[in-house]
Amino acid sequence: MPETAETYSLGIAVEVGKIDQELKKLWRESESAMTRASLMNLAVYSEEPGSLQSNTQLMARITGNHACRAIVIEADCEAADDQVSAWISAHCHVSSVGSKQVCSEQISFLLKGGCTTQLPNMVLSQLDSDLPFYLWWQKEFSEPIDPQLWTWVDRVIYDSHDWNDFRAQMRLVESAQEETRQRIVLCDLNWTRLDSFRFALAQFFDHPASHHRLAKISKVRIDFAPGFSSTAVLFVGWLGAQLNWKIADAKSLHDLRFVGSSGGKIDIELIESDGQPVHAVVLTSADVEFRVTYATCGDLLEVSRVQAGEKRMPQLMPAGSNDPVSLISEELMRGGPHRVYLHAVNCVRDFL
Amino acid sequence: MNRAADQPKPNPLREGLSARPVPQPCSIVIFGATGDLTHRKLVPALYNLAADGELPPDVVIVGFARRNKTDDEFRRDLEQSTRKFSRQPVRDEIWNTFAQSIFYHQSEFGDESGYTRLAKRLDEIDKSHGTRGNRLFYLAAGPDQFEPILKNLKAASLNQTCRGSWARVIIEKPFGTDLASARELNRIVRNSFAEEQTYRIDHFLGKETAQNILVLRFANAIFSPLWNTHYVDHVQITAAETLGVGTRAGYYETAGALRDMVQNHLIQLLCLVAMEPPTDLSADSIRDEKVKVVRSLRRWSCDEIAASVVRGQYTKGTINGEAVLGYREEQNVNPASQTETFVALRLFIDNWRWADVPIYMRVGKRLPKSATEISIHFKKAPAVLFNKDLRDLNVLVIRIQPDEGISLRIHAKVPGTSFLIEPVKMDFHYGTSFGKPSPEAYERLLLDAMSGDATLFARADEVEQAWAFVDPIEEAWCAKKGAPELFLYPAGSWGPEQADDLLARDGRAWRRL
């Protein structure tokens, strides 16, 4: 394997105009049995100094499960002079079915100066043809969002947890979506964080005989970590949207209350305490409590249904992880639009 | 009747979380719970589902067998085998919770009182574990035990449930040994369970690539216009294995390759390749189309069988550099055995789509490599343009196992000033493109049975039609006079040369695997 195929380095520096040739050379020079694989283009954009290295490490892990052409971009928009530096490398992993090395290419860019003008061309010229294009945006969106780039994006990935002004950011994303007339799928990692909890809670109500419990929910308690109130609110939004709850005249998060479709009141209790972003959810429906909490081992959820006079063993389910690689991997496994996410956002937009 | 109104309302919290029918809480009763299948496949599959969070929380496993065992002993045995055979390493925390839902029920299969006790126990489990009266009976015992088990389940009213609950039965192959016995088995099953309660498992259909055949054919518009007699020259299906008969001689001596593999696995694969597009993806729409394929298989006279079917048996030889015994020298095999370990067939599907397209199938033990593949060989392009006859056809290969994937062979110009044309291969490997390994076939199939999705299970008429096709071959082989010869082939070869002749007569050859 050539030296450039090491996992965590940026690889070899190349001239921007010769990236294609250099990539071909990289594969020609491969000594061992390697297969190049790609199911998508995954570009990650950050303005954080040093992000080229940190994102390269993330890509090395992500490509283990999701073969792709990785495009890693670090932008220094404040630099005085315009300059672009580029590197190529490969992330290789032993395939799940044997000893074959499966490799994903990475092209890295350091953009200095006029970032917004350079970015679309840099990305568009390096896309692997005919494969979907996922753009992972690691900073807040700012106006104007370049339609030249967005027109080609299939899924835009962001983390609303990092946003200072959810409503303003969401407006930008939605208007960009509208302007480009593209069916861009919005992938919020803050929403992905809730997947395992949503899954664990939903399975309580799979049997039709348990549906009546949904109409009797009177209280929702969510324990969340400091800084993750938006994650907890999204969870509440999900319940509200899916169960047709309406907000009952709340002015702030602290007195958030819903009215159910049958007119009953639903109290929402959001409790901040140390732990995972969301570490416990308890639904109360008449005399039954549906609980999802982290098990002591830390990477499993303990799922239990508690009713007076009934003793049931809690079940353990996979808990997911707040690690960006797990969140992105979870997101990349998914297809189709995020209708449920948008409904949840709309339900609690004023509180995000 | 308004069918939509009859459907239970979906769980609103499930929207967007699951793209498959959701499995229901239930008690899974495994008959033959101390056997190999339970230890190697079923319980490891259920554990993997639990570890992946795919198993509903209220699922209980009840092992039903003759030996005396306590719940704890049974759990310990299963833990040991699951640690050995599970796809993913066993985690203590998950196993401990999972094991709390495993119970053992000792009874003879023929003892009616054992079933009465079972019914009582299941009622108690419903109350203590929320299994809601749903029962899934898995018949992992020998086929000779099916009748007493099914009769006794009925006698104990375990085939019936109260409103809103269900009872289903999963049957392992062999589904009979010929048409008469298959009909008899179906009758026995029907006496206790309706067809929609019956799930006949064929683990080949649980494999990712087998399911992908439908996606390849019906989600890719480029193949659909070519998938017929106008463009397809012929089809080959190979199921080869390097293994010999091993410890299965007792069964294999009475079955042979035709009954063991062709009647079920290979015909099922052929159906997926040859069927018409179903009207929808419901179990019966798909199975209706599959059964039409089996019904359209051309039936043969005795003479035609000799000309279209080759049977063989391995003699001693070499596999992967090691000397191996011949079939007749294997343990528990009759030294004069006439059981076939290899079959090659030249079939025709007499319908509009496949008229005159030969389908070549071969299956065998002790062949040079283990591989199950389907290949679609397309007709030659006219030779006029390049003034030469292109040797190789375009071939689309669907690899079922191992290294699941799809490849397409096309022609390309060799770089240079001359017009040299050579075949090149475009290759897709599941393992390369998708890092996440596929679940085991049993995981998928058990979930389907818990969800009430019978798409990947064989229906009674499919099984009977397949036997109706296979029986005349068996009869011809067993004829006292003029039976087609059993050809011998050395272990490690691709079968008797007569199998090559089947294709050579048509100017074709088996694909090099």
Image (cartoon, grey):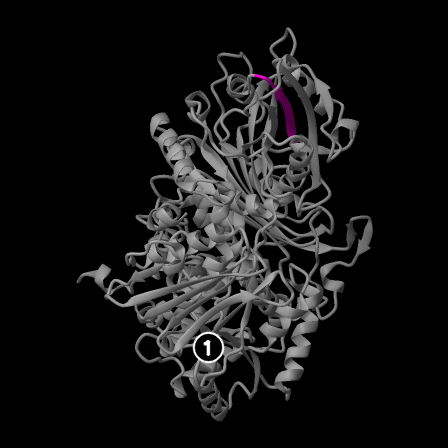
- Choose between A148 and A256: the one closer to the eye: A256
Q: Position of residue A331 (x, y in %)?
A: 51, 44
Say whether residue A52 is magenta.
no
How many C-alpha atoms fall within 10 Å of the one at disc 1: few (<14), some, or many (≥20)? some
Residue B325 located left or right of residue A186: right
- In the image, taking residue B287 as reference, residue B342 lies left or right, namely right
Residue A167 rendering spot, x and y as whole percentages: 39, 40
Between B373 and A119, the one nearer to me in the picture = A119
Image point (78%, 52%), residue name: B317
Q: Which residue lies furthest to the left in this view?
A: B1
The residue under label 1 is: A306
State the residue at coordinates (52%, 17%): A121
Tag 1: amino acid = Val
Horizontal relation, residue A63 to residue B451: left or right: right
Q: Is residue B75 above or below residue B257?
A: below
Query: Is B259 in front, or is A154?
Result: A154
Asked whether residue A107 is drawn in magenta, I would say yes
Q: Residue A58's spot in the image, x, y percent?
A: 65, 39
Tell me which secondary structure the magenta stretch mostly adopts.
strand
Q: Which of B167 and B366 is in front in this view?
A: B167
- In this rendering, is residue B325 above or below A81? below
Taking the image as shown, residue A106 lies to the left or right of residue A233, namely: right
Segment tinted magenta in the rendering? A104-113
Name the image quarter holding residue B198: bottom left
The chain holding disc 1 is: A
Q: Is mark 1 on a helix, strand or loop?
A: strand
Q: Residue at x 58, y 57 (%)?
A: A276
